[in-house]
Amino acid sequence: MPLTGRKTLTQYLIEERRRFPEASGDFNALILDVAMACKAIARAVAFGALGDVLGNHAAAAGGSVNVQGETQEKLDVLSNDYFLRITEWGGHLAGMASEEMDAPYQIPSTYPRGKYLLVFDPLDGSSNIDVNVSVGSIFSVLRAPAGEDREVTEADFLQPGTQQVAAGYALYGPTTMFVLTVGNGVTGFTLDPNLGEFMLTHPDLTVPADTQEFAINASNSRFWEAPVKRYVDECLAGKTGPRAKDFNMRWIASMVAEAHRILMRGGVFLYPRDCKDPAKPGRLRLLYEANPIGFIMEQAGGRASTGRVPMLGVQPDGLHQRIGLVFGSKHEVERIERYHAEPPARKDLDNPLFHERSLFRV
Ligand code: AFP
């Protein structure tokens, strides 16, 4: 054990690797590069207004939106750049894809190509930056097609979540945390600001199977499908309703922060498919939001779903595909899946909570 009395992320990865004598070390080096990018982003976030990094990128760059049609914050662009610059040179990656880039990123010809693909949302929740609310980075590692030394294509990235080699996130909150799964449970590390190292603080993270806390953006309630309305309705009905217990509600609008809360104390998160915009079957993105968070949840004993089918089984059809996402405590996610599978009950449509002038109006 090092002098600090805790394992560093590096020591953790080296010890894990010893279980696979054939491993080349490429994977560990890649994860350490990703962690380095997250440390760089953590510093930029921490400086806030002092670092001249707040605000809209458009104002500085004469107009900038990402492929989602969303305005890019300066920190979105900076964080994307950190991910690219800090991971492209090592020879571990064949290519990258990010929320902030239309097309796959090709590893510059000056660097060797490697066997992994990195997919990331460099700064999730970035609209919270200017109000000093927690934000995070999310990443997923996939294998590149074997034995092919060529430029990557979008099709290379369209792998279901079950194919992920690793996934994780960094949370830039009161402390900076790095949470990782390599398919063998979930481990959490806290950034020691003095050493600049991620230290192992949360081994074997598990999500309790039951919960009394849910997270959903209730302002979308009029667009929800009947099973979601039913679920939320029953939670709100509390002790005297069909669930016979009171529920608490949270909405940070920063998915990494919600996922972290759920990893720490349970809960269920829903950003379901809705009819708000027929062109968007959900708000969140499959490859760099739903799949990595889904992998982490499942590895922690929780569950992740579209509401209808397990998230990790979905075959992606586009780099920036959106999808309905439900994750967290297993029994609650299973209940939501059950509600989707059942034919809608007449009483759900008649429930007073969804009537004109009620909180969850249809
Ligand atoms: P931004 O990165 O644009 O802030 O989006 C954050 C996010 O993708 C996710 O982290 C939140 O859960 C969700 O969007 C919040 O969406 P609403 O603003 O619709 O509540």
Image (tube, rainbow, N blue to C red):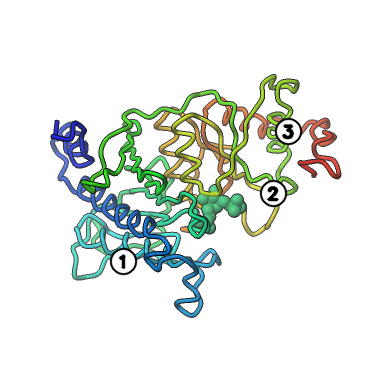
- The answer to whether the beta carbon of the residue marked 2 is less than 8 Å from any atom of ligand 1 is yes
Q: Name the quarter where the C terminus is drawn.
A: top right
Q: Residues within 10 Å of mark 1 (few under 14, many from 20)?
A: some
Residue in the foreground of this view, choosing between 293 and 215: 215
Q: Is residue 82 left or right of residue 76?
A: left
Q: Residue furthest bottom?
A: 62
* Element on which disc 3 rests: helix
Residue at image location 27% in from the left, 47% down from the top:
193
Relative placement, left or right, of 3 versus 243 is left
Q: Secondary structure at mark 1?
A: strand
Residue flagged by tag 2: what amino acid is it?
Answer: Asn
Q: Amino acid at mark 3?
A: Asp
Q: Is residue 321 visible?
A: no
Name the amino acid, label 1. Answer: Gln
> Cα distance, mark 1 to mark 2?
38 Å
For residue 220, the mark is 2
Compute the Cα span from label 1 to label 3: 47 Å
What crowding class fits label 2: few (fewer than 14 Cα within 10 Å), some (14-19), or many (20 or more)?
A: some
Determine which of the numbered discs, if any, sits on residue 106 in the image. 1
